[in-house]
Image: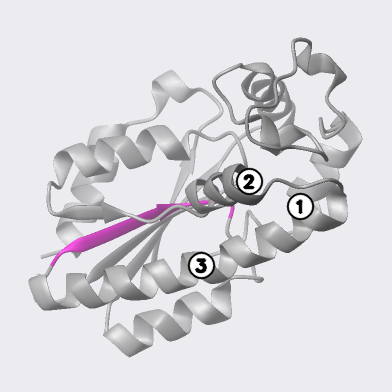
Amino acid sequence: MTGAVLVLLAGLPGTGKTHLCSRIRACFPNCTQVSIDVVKEALWERYGFDDAAQKRELDDMALRLFFSDLDTALGHAHDSAAMVVSDYPFSDKQEPTLRALCERHRATVMTIRLTADLEVLFERQQRRDLDPSRHLGHIVDHYHRGDTLKDRTAATGLLTREEFYRRCTTRGYDAFRLGDLLEVDATDLDAVDHEAILKWIAARSE
């Protein structure tokens, strides 16, 4: 590997991107993770939001900060021949800036696009949103540091099945790609061959 490598874990929500990211970081020690959700959650904690409009403003700020963080990470990776990994349901919204950053840093980019049966994903998303360990800001339209919600089923931002399906079929999550593409069916998470994925990355990082 002679320059920066960027691995984008893309695809539908709830397909195990976060877990795969941890496997990649464990396999490739010289790897930096840059996450949009981490930036979002930090902004929610710092500023809070009172309604959906304020939340969108913070989320837009998070995207700009994410690109800035990714720019920095790719610059460091280019100098040290290291790897950068990022996981998100990427779409056409992020593609032009991601492409420009890769061209600027002459990065080798690859996309692992995870897909799955939508009904399975909806149920998985519901479980994740109701998990107390998930940041509350993801499922509410009003949040400030320290806020809690005892009954998460009452959260205003929980997606209906119809809205979840609409997002998954209209936002281009299942079509995003930059560079080499590996598509993985994550309907059954236990059946995902993580070792084969890691070997695929290694072969393209040499």
The residue carrying mark 3 is 65
What kind of secondary structure does the magenta stretch mostly adopt? strand
Which amino acid, by three-letter code, is at mark 1? Lys
Query: Is disc 2 in contact with disc 1, using a CB cutoff of under 8 Å?
Result: yes
Whether residue 106 appears in this view of the structure is: yes
The residue carrying mark 1 is 55
Q: Which residues are magenta?
A: 82-89
The residue carrying mark 2 is 44
Q: Residues within 10 Å of mark 1 (few under 14, many from 20)?
A: many
Whether residue 172 appears in this view of the structure is: no
Numbered disc 3: secondary structure: helix
In the rendered image, which quarter contains the N terminus? bottom left
Does the magenta-highlighted stretch encompass residue 86? yes
Judged left or right of residue 51, residue 190 is left
Image quadrant assignment for residue 111: bottom left
In the image, farthest residue toward the top = 150
Which residue is rendered at x = 59% and y = 70% of the image?
Answer: 94
Q: Residues within 10 Å of mark 3 (few under 14, many from 20)?
A: some
Judged left or right of residue 185, residue 47 is right
Which residue is rendered at x = 60% and y = 16% of the image?
Answer: 132
Q: Position of residue 9 (x, y in %)?
A: 44, 51
